[in-house]
Amino acid sequence: MMTTNTLRYALFAGALLLPAAAGAQELRLMTGPQGGVWVPLGGQLKDLWEKAIPGAKIQSLPGAGIANVRAIDAGKAEIGFGNSISTVDGLEGNAPFPKKQADICNVASLYPQYFQMLVPMDSDIKSAKDLKGKSITTQPRGNTGELITGQLLKVHGLSYNDVKVSFVSYTDSVQQMQDGQAQAFSLGTAIPSGAVMDLASARDVRLLDLSADLAGMKKLNPGYTLVTVPKGTYPKQDKDVKVIGYATHIVASCKLPADQVYAMTKAIADNVPALTATSKAVAGLTPQIMAEDIGVPFHPGAARFYKEKGLTVASR
């Protein structure tokens, strides 16, 4: 029979174990910069996942494509948004990653991303090669849009030393364009971009056609594609514009339990209408699109979900 002291000790020891058990269900979700679509989408995913995983508590944190991969690999987060091109660079240990990011698994592709460069409607900048000596604004270091901006300059034999560049938030970039401090604004996001709509409401701007840059960009990263921003996406955009494309996806630590990641993957597939209400970019998402091969092996939990749907994917 258990004595009073023994019982007290058992209850005390059990209490000590409670925080660890709860902590196992505390997940950190890295989203994106303020003003981008990843922040509201992250809020929606947080709600869905907390319902799908009993006892889970998800903390949504600001981030960026490159920074999110680094954070997960370093154990500072468990799940986050990523961009296919920079995630592949992370796995390979290509710049700007200092080493191979080993603890990164794919969960689901969500939608195509569009690298866009805006200039004033009456600007003499017709292509990226005309940026030399100009003032440009882009996202902070560690953001995929900033990385692509540097690569686009490189394709034309330029670097940040050849332009005057600001690494700031979407909001600050819009303000700089409105005030005439910047002559070009580059960003990687879904369409229509809220930041671009804000800018277009204040002054007439136009998208640069980047189709001539694709070949050079693919030499730097074979994951780049050409995507179309349909006419009418933005005010006074009277024709389709070709820009550089890649995919937004969800990445997770490969150490996460398979059951948790299975539940997360299923929750995405089962709640496309709710996600679409937050971002139209997700409209039409299917398990087939989610399982797209973008060169990043899937988490075993996600792979199990896709297998149930009759899809074969490469997993860790």
Image (tube, rainbow, N blue to C red):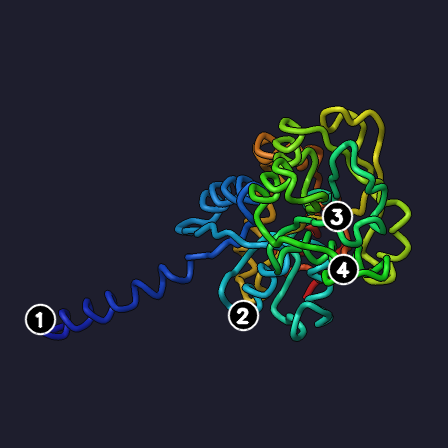
* Helix, strand or loop at mark 2: loop
Given residues 106 and 245, the one toward you in this image is 245
Sequence-wise, the earlier of marks 2 and 4 is 2
Sequence-wise, the earlier of marks 2 and 1 is 1
Query: In the image, what residue occupies the spot 78% across and 27% down?
Result: 237
Q: Is there a contact, CB below 8 Å, between mark 2 and mark 3? A: no
> Residue 188, how many percent across, how many down?
69, 47
Q: Looking at the rendering, which quadrant does residue 167 occupy?
A: bottom right
- Label at residue 162: 4
- C-alpha distance separating marks 1 and 3: 57 Å
- C-alpha distance separating marks 1 and 4: 77 Å
Q: Residues within 10 Å of mark 4 (few under 14, many from 20)?
A: some
* Helix, strand or loop at mark 1: helix
* Helix, strand or loop at mark 3: loop
Query: Does residue 90 appear anywhere in the picture?
Result: yes
Sequence-wise, the earlier of marks 1 and 3 is 1
* Helix, strand or loop at mark 4: helix
- Residue occupied by mark 2: 74
Looking at the rendered image, the disc whose residue lies closer to the viewer, 2 or 4, is 4
> Residue 213, how many percent across, how many down?
87, 51
Sequence-wise, the earlier of marks 2 and 3 is 2
Q: Is residue 67 above or below residue 35?
A: below
> Residue 218, how many percent across, how many down?
86, 57
The disc labelled 4 sits on which kind of residue? Asp
Query: In the image, what residue occupies the spot 74% across and 46% down?
Result: 115
- Label at residue 4: 1
